[in-house]
Amino acid sequence: MLDATQNHSLPARPGVGYKAQHYSDIMENPGPLGWLEIHAENYMGDGGRPLAQLRHLAERFPISVHGVGLSIGGEGDLDADHLARLKHLIGWLNPASFSEHLAWSTHDSHFFNDLLPLPYTEQTLARVATHINQVQDTVGRQMLLENPSSYLAFAESTMSETDFLRELTQRTGCGLLLDVNNVFVSATNLKTSPQAYIDDFPLEAVGEVHLGGHDEDEDETGAPLLIDSHGKAVVDPVWALLDYTLAKSGPKPLLIEWDTDVPPWPILADEITRADRALTLITS
Amino acid sequence: MTVTQSAFKAAVLDPAATVPTGIVNPDGAAASKRFDVYRNNVAVSLSDALESAFPVVRKLVGDEFFRAMAGVYLRKHPPKTPLMMFYGDAMPQFLRRFEPTKSIGYLPAIARIELAMRHAYHAKDVAPADAQALTTLASDALMSTKLSIAPATQTVTSDFPIHAIYLANTQADAPKPVMQPQAVVITRAGFDPQIHLVNAAAATCIEALKKGQSLGQAIATADDTLDLGTVLGLLLAQGAVTEIY
């Protein structure tokens, strides 16, 4: 159990997932941009331009380190080498926030570069809590855990995702990263209510909110199947779900995630402006 | 009805496999198209990583062929770490053994160049040594001198014109490759790796220096086509010598 009162947090302003092609735009004309998020694994080389750029960015902006490869839900032990790399990155960068996913991606020393799903059982809960404790003890700070996008369910699950996440925060002192696009995707795919999910979510533990775009497909029964692609603009129902969430939670750091088919900076700047308006709406 | 991660993994990598029992849609029925989202995510993200890692190999074999080959590679060699920037280390050996590419003799060396360029891009930043220290040494002292070589520095040697092939596929005005053996050294003076044409003796000598051998020992590893002045001039000009001792 980690003391969650350490002085690490992001400002309740819009942030963006950093892409190297936007370096000059961000440095020259950030607008309402308040912070940046990086994928931890992209900055685990030994040197070169990525680390040099990151050092410059960190002088100007609070940085959120978002891991995509820790496999915190893996059945096996956490990858000690990878944990050591994370500790090193967090050590020298001293970011404003560190987050990872409720998912697994490594099994038998093979990494799949995707966030694979977990059944919500007592057994999974115990394992994930142990791994979160190990991560927080190793990096010496609180981590935020992100809710996944779900495409399917496990017959063996015995608890809801929101209960599962709440229990994790209580057992480990971790915070949560609430991805409202993931909430919308999962609720559509699993035929549940996204508003009910937000109502059940432990909003007091949320240290960051993600917003991103998704693709639309159908399953073999003709039911909608939304896919979390991070390759499009945030859709209106997700902006509405954000407003619903912020009205209950108060202002939070908001991240625009756009990882594939990354657009030119002005398009991202529009999304940032819209996130800024959502924050202004609840503070005015 | 527990779905183990090894059962999940096996089905995710094999499109023909049955989806593990216990994976369901919201109505409790089997969910194979939903499971396919993960199959597709894994295959597409790993193929994309290979495409961006090996643009020249891809150009040489064609987009469609590369995509199909990546599908075979990613199932035979899934990543061993989450550092996707280094994914594809087994590509040269794979190309040498893969039936449709094994007869294309230069491909493995081109893949090695592309791996070396990427490793150089992410290599540790180092300060170059003062070249003056070398020019003032007497010749017998020079032979026992050792050089620390910047970690970005790598060589590739081939029976094929790999420098010419690499240039012809990355630069608009490069001449057509002519059949001959070629060797290259990759360096990184600033942030962008550079590729230089050298002869095989120079590559041998640089590899010996990297292992910590003295200049005299390194010269002895190479044949008499070695031009030491050119090798040292190149390494010093590229900031690839970090210590002279």
Image: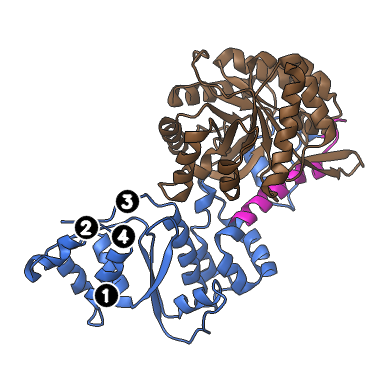
At label 3, counting other C-alpha atoms closer than 10 Å, the crowd grade (few under 14, some 14-19, many 20 or more) is: many
First reached walking from the N terminus: tag 1 or tag 4: 1
Q: Which chain is blue?
A: B
Q: How far is disc 1 from disc 2 in space, using C-alphas?
A: 17 Å
Badges 4 and 3, same chain? yes
Question: Which quadrant holds the C terminus of chain A?
Answer: top right
Q: Amino acid at mark 2?
A: Asp
Question: Which residue is found at the position 61% from the left and 38% from the top?
Answer: A30
| Circle 4 residue | B239
Tell me: residue B181, above or below residue A52.
below
Q: Amino acid at mark 4?
A: Gly
Q: Secondary structure at mark 3?
A: loop
On the rendered structure, is A51 left or right of A119?
left
Q: Amino acid at mark 1?
A: Thr
Q: Main secondary structure of the magenta part?
A: helix
Whole-percent x, y for residue A114 in the image: 64, 42
Badges 1 and 3, same chain? yes
Q: How far is disc 1 from disc 4 in space, using C-alphas?
A: 14 Å
On the rendered structure, is A38 left or right of A114?
left
First reached walking from the N terminus: tag 1 or tag 2: 2
Q: Secondary structure at mark 1?
A: helix
On the rendered structure, is A128 left or right of A274?
left
First reached walking from the N terminus: tag 4 or tag 3: 3
Chain A shown in which color?
Answer: brown
Labelled pair 1, 3 in contact (Cβ < 8 Å)? no
Whole-percent x, y for residue B96 in the image: 51, 70
Instruction: Provide the residue span drawn in magenta.
Output: B25-49
Chain designation of label 1:
B
Labelled pair 4, 3 in contact (Cβ < 8 Å)? yes
Q: Amino acid at mark 3?
A: Val
Q: Which mark is residue B126?
A: 3
Q: Which mark is residue B230?
A: 1
